[in-house]
Amino acid sequence: MPSISKMGHIKAWCIVLAVNAAASLATPVRPRALVSKSTPIDLTAYFNNKAFGTYPGEAAFDPLNQSYPAPGVALNGSYSSTQTGIIYDFPGYRGPRKPDNVLCTGQVIDVPERNYFSASILVASDVELETVSDNLTFTYHDNTTSTSELRSEPWFAFLTINRGEIILPYRYTSNDTNFNTTHIYEYSYALQSDKALASISLPTTTNTTTGRLHVFAVSLWEGSGVSVQSVRPTQKWIGNGTQIVEVTVNNAGTECVSGAGLNITLSGGNITAANPGFLKRLCPGDQKRVNVGIKGVSKSPVSVTLNDGSLQQSQSFHGLELGLSAWSTDLDSLAQHEAPDWYDGAKFGIFIHWGPYAVPGWGNSTPHESYAEWFWWYTTHHPEADASDFYDYRLRTFGPDWNYDDSFVNYTASKFDPKAWVDLFADAGAKYFVFTTKHHDGFANFDTGVTSNRSSIHYGPKRDILGELFDAAAEHQPSLRRGTYFSLPEWFNPDFGPYGFSQLATDSSTSWPGMLATNPYTGLDEPYTGHVPVNDFIADVMVPQMEILAYNYSTDIMWCDCGAANGTADFAADWWNKARAQDRQVTMNSRCGLAHTADFDTPEYATFSTVQARKWESNQGMDPYSYGYNRATSPSAYMNASTIVYDLVDMVSKNGNFLLDIGPRADGSLVKEEEDNLREAGKWINTHAEAIFNTTYWFITPESGSLRFTQTNDAFYILSLEKPMNGTLVIDAPIPILEGDELSAVGVGNGTSLTWEKVADGLRIDVPQSIIKEEEYCWVFKVEYRSLS
């Protein structure tokens, strides 16, 4: 019979259901169900640092004697994660002298010796701009160990580009209050649930320059069999107003969910089931998030039911509000928005940086290269920041009387072919693109209406570049989603003056001064061509231009940059409500100046060694360190097809997207090496698409040596970034494969079944030499779930 185990009769298995709600744990309907639960660990004895204060100088979380404000959450000492449902003992403010967190110095945290499914941690690092990571070690009763990366973004970032599980509205400096949000992050780790855990060893991170890790809370998830960890209503939907509710299911048992799998439904109040969730395979130690569609609104007790076709179990729970609601400018309302499923599944996008900065098109060469699109800023003479010597290059190339806006006439777009561009993106395997509509120089590649005449409509190409590109995509590559990069501030727009800022208190800091640039050689003001004076930059330029991109051009992705002062809250609430009315699911990145509207994080030139449960997208150039065109880059330095494939596979396996940038020349022509390498990588991407797009990560581990893993509801994929040697591939990980499943190579081998065998704690695959030789870049193997047991 189709069941949760391979044993073939009802008494051999048990579905365990639990829901973490702030109010209480639910009571099982069936008395024989076991309730899984969070087990918070008491860290009080280990506290050695004070993070929370009620006034400046009371606490010294970081080396500068700065601190978080006393949090407005977990006032009773208990905090329930909004994303995972895990319950923590959260210290909060404990008084004027009591410490409240563990500064990691290698402490060994003893835990009650029991079998646990996972460990979850609330953590933060304490130096701005510094991401800190080191290994956690989990020690089991039998003295074996496992390790995982404990990693954290900084507790604050000036341009609000990070979003934590807990967001606090400001921070205390040593003698003042800084109204920049601060954050605490959550990470979860799979444990060896067949062994009793004895202790957790924290890393040693004590360098005050590169940053230290602080742990606020640890909670372990206990359970047996298959259990529901959390039920999370989202504000995402499937057409016709069907709300998506995310159900997180764990398997802490000893047998796989297989055969007919599990149907997952919600009921209660006046909600009706619209789209049951379905989970086809879930093996021991694994976790999956399953979408369930419901209609209606309810604050009544709700039941979640797992049904394998022969036996079902339900559990009632409280504390959730179901139903789609309009977005308001309230931060808690905005925080409910998240990246839509189409974006999560898209995985690979093309970034395009193109503007008047392509005329000088220079950023020096490695190892002294800087962003070429920052040419104007660097050449206004910032000697402490100008290690790439833009200052001398501008003088010897253009002479002392040249001003940046003199580049407009040579920004011609004479070879710009929008159809060729979107065809290239499709050939490369990309599912979306993001075009730079306006960079920090304030020059817009779209029709800005009455807000500014500093645009491609009035100068340079005298064309609506964005409109032509979006129209070409709609006509020739309609499956491509379309996004717009938009710089919120403008460096030298005099109307930005009231909001001008420097990112850091150093001479080398990047800055948006909000005053006319000074020619560094003549001392005269440079023009700001096309400037239309306004009363307020945010109300009259920033927000209206965002609205133009949202409504006139129907962007799918509002990809902001450098959001300090902003009008994002009003814009986002209005845009999201109007998009829903049109049945469009749109998204915003993490750089719009408001942490609560950040649907996904946007690290630059970076990847991770572990899964990031929060959606992220790494952006980087095919140029080794520039987004805009850099004529100093040698042809051999551009990212090759092998690296594109490697980075894409690596990021996708860890819940990331890859936004890869090209920098066109001023005439709109593309660098041949960028075109060639994109098309070459696209051959592999398009023939292995099923292992990349619309997949999700593996909870147990995203990588094992050169191996990466992805999965869908119907299949599991093993991606080897190294050529299998000696005709075999051995995977030292518990691959979810059962007798009766089909194993084959993807992209090569014509779907021929391969011989496999379970060995020790892993899997051995016999790989024919023909497949090894035929493939390049990455060898992909598919486990198709066909087992009936």
Image (cartoon, helix red, strand yellow):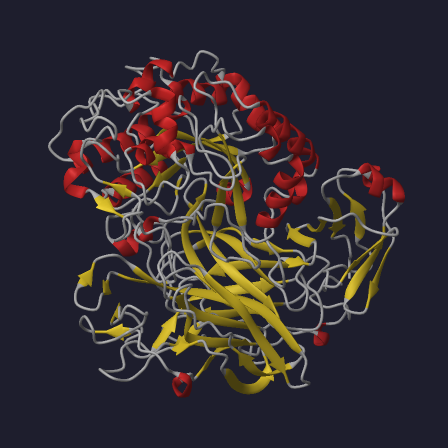
Q: How many marks?
A: 0
Q: Nearer the viewer, residue 206 or 745?
A: 206
Quarter of the image where the C terminus is located? bottom right
Q: Nearer the viewer, residue 112 or 722?
A: 722
Taking the spot 22% from the left edge, 65% from the top edge, the residue there is: 173
Q: Which picture quadrant has residue 697?
A: bottom right
Q: Position of residue 18 (x, y in %)?
A: 51, 72
Q: Position of residue 564 (x, y in %)?
A: 26, 46
* Vertical comparison of 500 with 427: above or below: below
Does residue 191 show up? yes
Quarter of the image where the N terminus is located? bottom right
* Vertical comparison of 713 with 470: above or below: below
Report whether 779 appears left or right of 727. left
Q: Position of residue 509 (x, y in %)?
A: 30, 47
Report whether 616 appears left or right of 59. right
Taking the spot 32% from the left edge, 82% from the top edge, the residue there is: 99
Taking the spot 67% from the left edge, 41% from the top edge, the residue there is: 690
* Vertical comparison of 424 with 333: above or below: above
* Vertical comparison of 195 with 679: above or below: below
Q: Which picture quadrant has residue 353?
A: top left
Does residue 226 show up? no
Q: Position of residue 104 (x, y in %)?
A: 45, 76
User: Among all residues in the image, which is located at the extreme left?
Assistant: 535
